[in-house]
Image (spheres, rainbow, N blue to C red):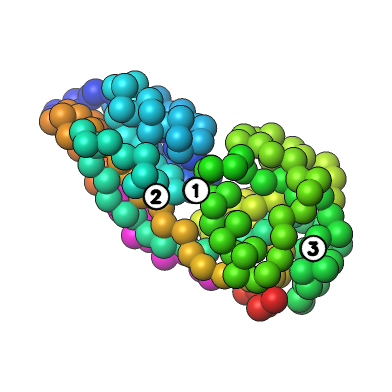
Amino acid sequence: MREGGSGLVVVGTSGASAADTVPLAVLRLLQRMPRAQVRLVETTMDRLMNQLAHNELDIVVGRSAPELQDAQTLGESLYLEPIHFVARPRHPLATQEAVTWEALQGYRWVVWPRGTPIRNALEAALASAGRPLPADCVESNSTVLNLTLLNNSDMIGLASHRTARRLEEMGALRIVPLRLAGFGSVSMYWRADAIKRSAVAAMLDCLRRAADREVPDAVVAAP
């Protein structure tokens, strides 16, 4: 305790929390436990939950995926948030006050792979709006790859609210002013035996605190 705490925690994150909640929680943890060792892994929730089940990760944070949870895994919902269409800052649609579905579907989309929670949320929102998924989408499960694609083209991407707001603050992306129906839930998962380790228990608390902070709403028009 005099030396500021130590220990290793391995955290897996999906794109829903990689740009905002997880890194902010890591900073809190390192303030609390300066000697803690942190390892971060980013991929899709199906892969992360499989790694958690095989004791390769201590904590997983991302879109809620109870269907991927096994009997040895505990879960806790952190927050609900909408998802947004996003594009490069100088995209023709990003500066408009309102965007129609017809205008949006005039561009190629970058979407997360089929079966991922954020893809499921997109498909549910499209079904609610009576709109199809464009046939010429690019599928990618990499946040960095998606950012590069979006910043070097007029492609349209998808991001959770906190990620979209964080990237907008950084000047990396803009939220397209068209509101999608529904909300997505972000949760954290961990193995019951892992909480006995101080670094893991502290990281869970830091994630709760990072999730509790207020995030401004995006002002987007209804479709």
Residue designated by label 3: 104
Q: How many numbered marks, from 0 up?
A: 3
Asked if the residues shown at circle 1 and circle 2 are in contact, with their CB atoms under 8 angstroms apart, the answer is yes
Under mark 3, the amino acid is Leu
Of the residues under marks 1 and 2, which one precedes in the sequence?
A: 2
Of the residues under marks 3 and 2, which one precedes in the sequence?
A: 2
Picture residue at 60% right of the left edge, 36% below the top: 141
Q: Is residue 186 visible?
A: yes
Q: CA distance from mark 3 to mark 2?
A: 27 Å
Residue designated by label 2: 64
Tell me: 76 left or right of 40: left
The x, y position of residue 110, in whole percent, is: 72, 45
The verdict on residue 149 being magenta is no
The verdict on residue 214 being magenta is yes
The x, y position of residue 152, in whole percent, is: 83, 42
Residue designated by label 1: 117
Determine the secondary structure under disc 2: loop
Of the residues under marks 3 and 1, which one precedes in the sequence?
A: 3
Q: Is residue 206 visible?
A: no
Determine the secondary structure under disc 1: helix
Q: CA distance from mark 1 to mark 2?
A: 7 Å
Determine the secondary structure under disc 3: helix
The x, y position of residue 79, in whole percent, is: 37, 59
